């Protein structure tokens, strides 16, 4: 009962502190806006300077279609935002950080494409300022080159298949702009067969027999060409990747951003509010009264955890409501969100109370809470190695992030949600118990 | 060491209290007895164990060994007035009193707060935040909060250390009234022998965690006084704790 009275006191003090209240309401708004901007930025193509040193103006004809250098450049422009410029300006822009990379088409590129004297090559120079960004651009450009090569290969093989068909079956063929009729292997075999039969009828069997190897060669050549055509057809259509779009409103990238925003907001507020609430009691010197049997350490710790969890739930609901209104994300299922936010808030609060119980004053508690929470939040977002996953699992941030993300991404109730909530409840109990023990030892001296 | 020097069964008694912090011994077998309506002054140099003894009597900390007992049938409630005011700075005077009255189990916290406001002469500061009160007024609120649990023994840790002479005078007037009118037993620690003589019925002198004197001022001077000393009580106190009193 006394713990409830203290909870009422803390909530009253919270409502009475406009600056803190403004932070609690304003922070999720700020995070929501930043997340929206970050997600937009994710979709924006990086700036790349484009230097074209091939001024030949030549075009390439493949499969009867004429393709210019601009058509190839357009493929790259699908991946990055190209800013045409000269070589010197491009180099300066890269050094100044105004572009992320420089793409150069060297002189003779189209000639190499047409005649194949050397493999046609484009050059990409990336900035050293951001290794991650440079790697992303390199992957994008490699992807573009792969698609160009794939398209060219398909066109060339298509042309080859037409040629093979004409050689086998005969017909009109155009090479380097000159057209002509081809007799074809099938008709050649028929002609040879007819010729042999005519010679035998004339009693010239020896001469007819001498035509047999020629007919065999022509037949074999036709068979081999048909086999080669089938192989070329297979190469023309290699393994392809079919990308199935996620259901509307459940984009994984956006879900990651929103779950991350929730984690940062709730994690920081939960830890810092709980840490400052418990250390505030000590700073007001009130613990010496409360500990006289008015409130047990366990009840006091529970009260502070509940206080920060309630504030976290309110804050989380504000953030989710803003995102539900301002984005296409499907943030329904409020019946699941409330217990998830509450249990996550309890776990964050328990960690914060432990930090506050260990620290001797509020400023130290806040600084320690912030310095501990930030790397742990980061670890919760990207636990890439088994060791990082293990550390992440020992704190509330990783499991909370997975629970948030599951609720946003999964179209049905995530099957592992009870497990995640149980994990969080366990962490809340463990940190809360540790905080009560620390408080008992510290305050009973 | 002298005896308790007063007849009657004590309301609160502690015996053999020892408190150790790792290698440090803060209390070493100390004992004290407090009777109804009595004012006991705890005297001693810094680090002699006064605050430790008070916190053990208040139930704030536990002794390493020894025990505290209440007279059967007596009202076993202490009011604790720590050296630094223990109150919520961002609550008003009334809210502080109401909250602590509720925590102490008052059936009507609002009425209890109104009563304490009147008794502590804090009515004009009722709706002022505690953090904005003057030092003397904060100390009165600190004391009023201690009374919220309707104690039979009031424990005060150097209650006048930070107060001006007029604030001290006002606080002692109220404490004397609480003792004489309401019958509260008062145990206070102080660095001032004069204050102990003026407001204590009895003095308990601590040195090195042990009780080295327990009796009234006349007996202190009679047993340990120095002939011709300008301040006989202070000289006797210094003699008891082992310092040069002349």
Image (cartoon, coloured by chain):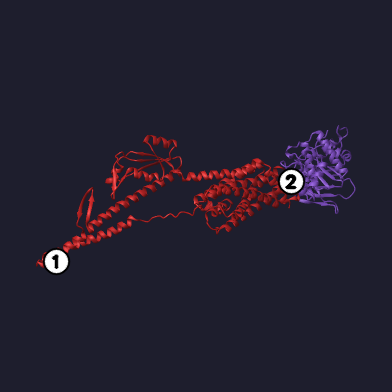
Q: Which mark is residue B239?
A: none
Q: Residues within 10 Å of mark 2 (few under 14, many from 20)?
A: many
Q: Which mark is residue A288?
A: 2
Image spot of residue A115 (x, y percent): 27, 46
Task: Identify which residue is drawn at 80% across, 44% down.
Answer: B114
Question: Disc 1: which chain?
Answer: A
Q: Which chain is red?
A: A
SS state under label 2: helix
> Toward which corner of the image does residue A430 lie, by quadrant?
bottom right
Evaluate whether residue B136 shows in this view: yes
Kindly report which numbered mark, 2 or 1, lies closer to the viewer in this rendering: 1
Q: How many marks?
A: 2
Q: Which mark is residue A197?
A: 1
Which of disc 1 and disc 2 is earlier in sequence? Answer: 1
> Toward which corner of the image does residue A54 lie, by quadrant?
top left
Image spot of residue A23 (x, y percent): 62, 42
Question: Disc 2: which chain?
Answer: A
Is residue B66 or residue B143 the one in the foreground? B143
Image spot of residue B189 (x, y percent): 80, 41
Q: Which chain is purple?
A: B
- The quadrant in which the N terminus of chain B is found is top right
Q: Residues within 10 Å of mark 1 (few under 14, many from 20)?
A: some
């Amino acid at each position: 009962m006394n713990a409830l009275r203290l909870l009422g006191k803390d909530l009253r003090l919270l409502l009475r502190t406009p600056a803190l209240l403004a932070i609690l309401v304003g922070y999720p708004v700020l995070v929501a806006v930043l997340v929206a901007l970050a997600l937009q930025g994710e979709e924006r193509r990086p700036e790349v300077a484009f230097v074209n040193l091939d001024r030949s103006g030549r075009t390439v004809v493949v499969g009867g279609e004429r393709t210019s250098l601009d058509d190839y450049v357009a493929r790259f422009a699908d991946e990055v935002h190209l800013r045409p410029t000269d070589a010197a300006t491009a180099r300066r822009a890269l050094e100044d950080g105004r572009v992320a990379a420089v793409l150069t088409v060297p002189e003779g590129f189209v000639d190499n494409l047409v005649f194949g004297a050397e493999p046609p090559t484009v050059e990409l120079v990336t900035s050293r300022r951001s290794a991650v960004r440079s790697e992303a651009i390199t992957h994008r450009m490699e992807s573009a080159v792969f698609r160009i090569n794939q398209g060219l290969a398909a066109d060339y093989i298509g042309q080859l298949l037409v040629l093979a068909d004409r050689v086998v079956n005969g017909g009109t063929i155009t090479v380097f702009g000159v057209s002509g009729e081809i007799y074809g292997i099938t008709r050649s075999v028929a002609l040879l067969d007819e010729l042999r039969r005519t010679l035998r009828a004339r009693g010239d069997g020896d001469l007819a027999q001498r035509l047999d190897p020629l007919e065999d060669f022509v037949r074999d050549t036709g068979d081999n060409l048909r086999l080669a055509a089938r192989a070329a057809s297979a190469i023309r259509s290699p393994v392809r990747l079919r990308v199935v779009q996620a259901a509307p409103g459940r984009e994984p990238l956006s879900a990651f951003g929103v779950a991350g925003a929730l984690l940062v907001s709730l994690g920081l507020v939960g830890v810092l509010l709980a840490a400052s609430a418990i250390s505030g009691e000590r700073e007001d010197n009130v613990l010496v009264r409360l500990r006289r049997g008015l409130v047990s350490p366990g009840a006091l710790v529970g009260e502070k955890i509940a206080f920060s969890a309630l504030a976290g739930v309110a804050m989380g609901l504000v953030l989710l409501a803003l995102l539900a209104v301002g984005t296409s994300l499907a943030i329904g299922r409020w019946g699941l969100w409330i217990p998830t936010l509450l249990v996550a808030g309890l776990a964050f609060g328990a960690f914060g109370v432990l930090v506050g119980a260990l620290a001797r004053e509020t400023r130290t508690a806040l600084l320690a809470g912030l310095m501990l929470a930030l790397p742990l939040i980061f670890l919760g977002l990207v636990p890439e190695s088994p060791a990082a996953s293990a550390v992440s699992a020992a704190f509330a941030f990783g499991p909370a992030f997975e629970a948030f993300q599951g609720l946003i991404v999964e179209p049905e109730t995530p099957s592992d949600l009870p497990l995640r909530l149980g994990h969080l409840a366990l962490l809340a109990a463990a940190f809360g118990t540790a905080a009560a023990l620390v408080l008992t030892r510290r305050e009973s001296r | 060491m002298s005896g308790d020097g007063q007849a009657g069964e004590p309301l609160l008694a502690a015996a053999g209290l020892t408190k150790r912090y790792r290698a440090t011994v803060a209390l070493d077998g100390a004992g004290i007895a407090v009777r109804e309506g009595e004012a006991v002054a705890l005297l001693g140099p810094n680090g002699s164990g006064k605050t430790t003894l008070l916190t053990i009597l208040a139930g704030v900390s536990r002794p390493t060994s020894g025990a505290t007992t209440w007279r059967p049938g007596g009202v076993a409630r202490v009011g604790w007035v720590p050296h630094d005011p223990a109150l919520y700075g961002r609550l008003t005077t009334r809210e502080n009193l109401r909250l602590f009255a509720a925590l102490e189990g008052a059936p009507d916290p609002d009425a209890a707060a109104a009563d304490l406001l009147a008794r502590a002469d804090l009515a004009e500061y009722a709706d002022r935040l505690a953090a904005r009160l003057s030092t003397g007024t904060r100390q009165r609120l600190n004391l009023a909060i201690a009374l919220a649990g309707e104690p039979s023994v009031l424990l005060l840790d150097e209650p006048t250390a930070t107060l001006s002479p007029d604030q001290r005078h006002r606080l002692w007037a109220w404490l004397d009234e609480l003792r004489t009118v309401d019958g509260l037993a008062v145990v206070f620690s102080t660095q001032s022998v004069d204050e102990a003589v003026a407001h204590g019925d009895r003095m308990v002198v601590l040195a090195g965690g042990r009780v080295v004197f327990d009796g009234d001022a006349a007996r202190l001077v009679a047993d340990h006084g120095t002939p011709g000393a300008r301040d006989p009580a202070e000289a006797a106190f210094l003699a008891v704790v082992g310092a040069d009193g002349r």
